Amino acid sequence: MTQEFGRTALDDLDQALVHALQIAPRAGWARIGAAVGADPVTVARRWSRLARSGSAWIGCHPGPAAAESGQGCLAFVEVDCANGRLTEVARALVAEAHVITVEHVSGGRDLLLTVLAPRLSALTRWVTHRLGALEGIVSTRTHLASTVYTEGSRWRLRALSSEQIARLADDAAPRGDTSVFELTDLDHALFAELSVDGRASHKVLAERCGTSPDTVRRRVNRLLSSGMAQFRCEVARPLSEWPVSLILWGRAAPAELRTVAEQVTGAREVRLCAGVIGRHNLKLVAWVRSLDDAQRFEVRLAQRVPALTVVDRAVALWPMKLNGNLLDEHGYRTGAVPIDVRAVGG
């Protein structure tokens, strides 16, 4: 085994375990063990070690269906900071429950935020009154997401064979079986708890949310089957073989945007592809192997999707917060801020 910043790199079983949990994040250890060829005690112990070291974790966040039902909006906010104030500004923003991602990035902005809000008016109020008044910020630019074509819960480490993947298929979260519905306070409380620990048991969730395990089971299943919740098993980027996070903004003809987005999402490296309303109409995030590979990826992307014009690019220098999870400068998890879309106020 090799070492990465004092941590043990993922061996074959670790990689298989992470891949299995990306497919079925809440599956029992017996089912996970059967898929990866290890006993339940071993895989449970392995996962505990990975989680304690911040090498891998499981969270949950509102899915695109929530926004599509009119119960939320997603925005990407660029922030320019005064000299010497970046760390102070970032520290204030990572503490906010609805600012789910905070990245220090290269290029024409200092920080890039991913923000959730229950409605457009609440987002507008937060940008104007909270963000606009935060000391150390020079300027901001807000880009609203229109359609999310793919996001990180669909990204896979690809360590399992097709046969192993098939063994987990029945346990993967059902999609589209339930129509969207109005989120309750309990649903928001479950989001907050599951964003910190996506494998928390129904019993533990019931105790923390003040209800019964059966109620929790029904609500969680309903959130998943409607697509209003997305579970995500993440791995620290240095351990993924794709340690560089590349952010691209592009432009395509409006009539071709969906086709372009579908072509983009077919690339293995792509973790996020979203339509945006702003000076560009497409944003994508890709994990690549190196800075040199970032340039090669853009060449491959141009060959794959000639109708897309890349107009801006950046590299995440330090993803300080990723879907509510706090990361150190190397990309390992150090804690979490529970996600609460209602915290934006307004």
Image (spheres, rainbow, N blue to C red):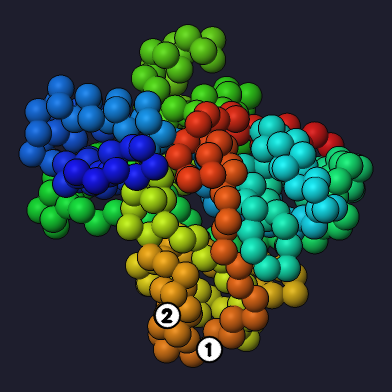
Residue 168, percent from left and from top: 19, 43
Task: Describe the element under mark 2 as helix, strand or loop.
Answer: helix
Front-lying residue, 171 or 273: 273
Distance in Å between CA atoms under marks 1 and 2: 18 Å
Coordinates of residue 213 in the picture (x, y in percent): 40, 14
Q: Nearer the viewer, residue 160 or 274?
A: 160
Q: Are marks 1 and 2 in contact (CB under 8 Å)?
A: no
Nearer mark to the viewer, of 1 and 2: 2
- Three-letter amino acid code at the position of disc 1: Ala
Judging by the rendered image, the residue that carries numbered circle 1 is: 307
Depth check: give the residue in front, 84 or 146. Answer: 84
Which residue sits at x=67%, y=37%?
Answer: 94
Circle number at residue 70: none
Q: Quadrant of the C terminus?
A: top right
Drawn side of residue 6 relative to residue 310, left or right: left
Relative to 76, does residue 214 appear above or below in the rendering? above
Secondary structure category for the residue under label 1: loop
> Residue 216, how many percent across, how many down?
44, 21
Picture quarter with the N terminus:
top left
Residue at 59%, 29% in the rendered image: 338
Compared across the picture, whether 7 is left or right of 45 comes to right
